[in-house]
Amino acid sequence: MRLHTDVYGAGNRTALVVHGIMSDHRCWHRLIGLLVDRGYRVVTVDLAGHGRSPRSRRYSPASWAEDVIESVSGADGGPSVVCPELVVGHSLGGLVTSIVVESLTPQRVIYIDPAFSAPTGWRKVLVGILLATLRTPSKERIARGNPRWSAEDVEIETETIALWDRRTVFGLARASATVPPTALVAPSLLVLADHSMLVPEPLAKSMAELGMQVEVVQGAGHVVFRDDFEGFLAKADAWF
């Protein structure tokens, strides 16, 4: 599937950024500006079922990854991403990134609180039901739930949830869907939320043993770069 893509900047280095579930490329607005200022050409995608991209009949991490690879292949006038200097993925986008990098062979990878695991048992069922039946929340509700977010991020989140296909939740429903990497294709930084639910401490330790640099942004929630952008930069700046 051909996804909606955007390109920012015209630097001689390329970065690909992949958003999380319920979101789209606009969540990266602060990071995009920073990377462009540092000489990057930044390529963004809206995953299937998100933002301006088409919806799919069925979703899975593998199909999301295939869509990304197809959409940045340079075909039909789309952007070309070959051996990029940097790939960044958050949440679902982090899981998708772990598959995509096997084909794109980047120089560096940053995973931000990626979906390398998921709730199991009744918690899994409950989370799936809650997400699939979630009504589009008001800006006021989003702001209350994310008191550290800027007004711009609250506005973006309101718009992106309205565009989101709730059936994407079921693309992560199978236990086999959320599988962490078993090998690294490039130097990798893992930036975690404080008390991450998707990468609990034992899994973080195994990722460190695999060779990832693991950092935790104290006090930050799942969307680390929106909760505390400066704290995120303090952990990731040297990787840009």
Image (spheres, rainbow, N blue to C red):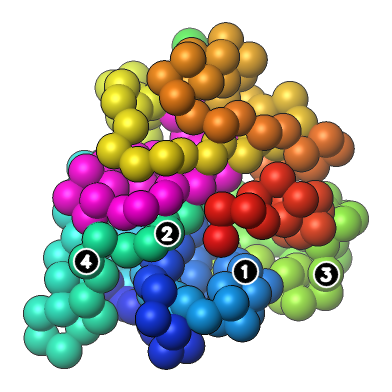
* Alpha-carbon span between mark 4 and mark 1: 21 Å
x then y, percent, for residue 158: 66, 69
Q: Earlier in the sequence, mark 3 or mark 1?
A: 1
Residue picked out by circle 1: 31
Disc 4 is placed on an element classified as loop
Region in magenta: 94-119
Q: Amino acid at mark 1?
A: Leu
x then y, percent, for residue 203: 52, 16
For the point 49% across and 70% down, which residue is it? 25
For disc 1, the neighbor class at 10 Å (few under 14, some 14 to 19, many from 20) is some
Disc 3 is placed on an element classified as loop
- Check whether the beta carbons of the residues at disc 4 and disc 1 lie within 8 A of each other: no
Q: Earlier in the sequence, mark 4 or mark 3?
A: 4
The quadrant the C terminus occupies is: bottom right
Q: Amino acid at mark 2?
A: Leu
For the point 18% across and 50% down, which residue is it? 103
The quadrant the N terminus occupies is: bottom left
Q: Earlier in the sequence, mark 2 or mark 3?
A: 2
- Check whether the beta carbons of the residues at disc 2 and disc 4 lie within 8 A of each other: no
* Alpha-carbon span between mark 2 and mark 3: 26 Å
x then y, percent, for residue 176: 28, 22
Residue picked out by circle 3: 150
For the point 15% across and 71% down, which residue is it? 73
Residue picked out by circle 2: 86
Residue 140 is covered by the magenta coloring: no
In this orientation, does residue 182 appear?
yes
Q: Amino acid at mark 4?
A: Val
Instruction: Choose top left, top right, bottom left or bottom right for residue 197.
Output: top right
* Alpha-carbon span between mark 2 and mark 1: 12 Å
Name the foreground residue: 20 vs 230: 230
Q: Amino acid at mark 3?
A: Ser
Residue picked out by circle 4: 82
